[in-house]
Amino acid sequence: MKVGPITYINVIFKDLSISSLATLDHSTRNSEQEDIGFSFVNCSVTGNEGAIYLGRAWENYLRMVYSYCDIDNIIDPSGWSDWNQPSRQRDAMFGEYECRGKGADTRNRVWWSKSLGFVEATPFLDTHFIDGEDWIT
């Protein structure tokens, strides 16, 4: 967590229905070492048909993961945007794990996004991601 004029925290969204008209995003980090990001687990992502992104790298070191989500055909096939900043392709961590639905096809995703395996996805799947074992009962 970054604490200061603006506070950034890890967030896990679980079992939600998300209806979007624009890009789904965002979290920000100052470095890869900061343990900050968004995780969407078992969510339903719907909206108007079109071409929205799962996330965009509006700042450096963005981190977002979608796991076990049902994604409708509203997602641009590339999936993710570097927000016209190619240097962010090295910094951003955008991942997908075991998602389903017409918008979950990763074959045309940007080369710098990740199709995660179980070991890579595990840290994003439960309350450990938000240090929930310390405050969620």
Image (tube, rainbow, N blue to C red):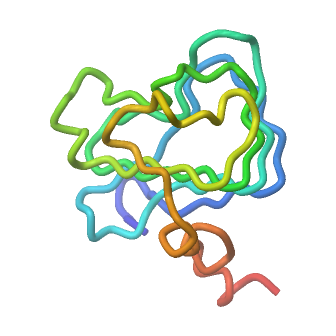
Residue 104 placement (x, y as % from top left): 65, 36
Residue 60 lies, with reference to residue 76, above or below; the image says below
Task: Report the label total.
Answer: 0
Location of the N terminus by quadrant is bottom left
Location of the C terminus by quadrant is bottom right
Left or right of 82 on screen, residue 101: right
Q: In front: 6, or 94?
A: 94
Residue located at (59% from left, 56% from top)? 39
Q: In front: 30, or 62?
A: 62
Residue 32 lies, with reference to residue 88, above or below; the image says below
Residue 50 lies, with reference to residue 119, above or below; the image says above
Residue 2 placement (x, y as % from top left): 38, 65
Q: In which image quadrant can residue 112 be found? A: top left
Residue located at (29% from left, 51% from top)? 61
Left or right of 120 on screen, residue 42: right
Q: In which image quadrant can residue 81 be found? A: top left
Residue located at (71% from left, 57% from top)? 41
Residue 63 placement (x, y as % from top left): 42, 52
Q: Residue furthest front?
A: 107
Residue located at (19% from left, 30% from top)? 86
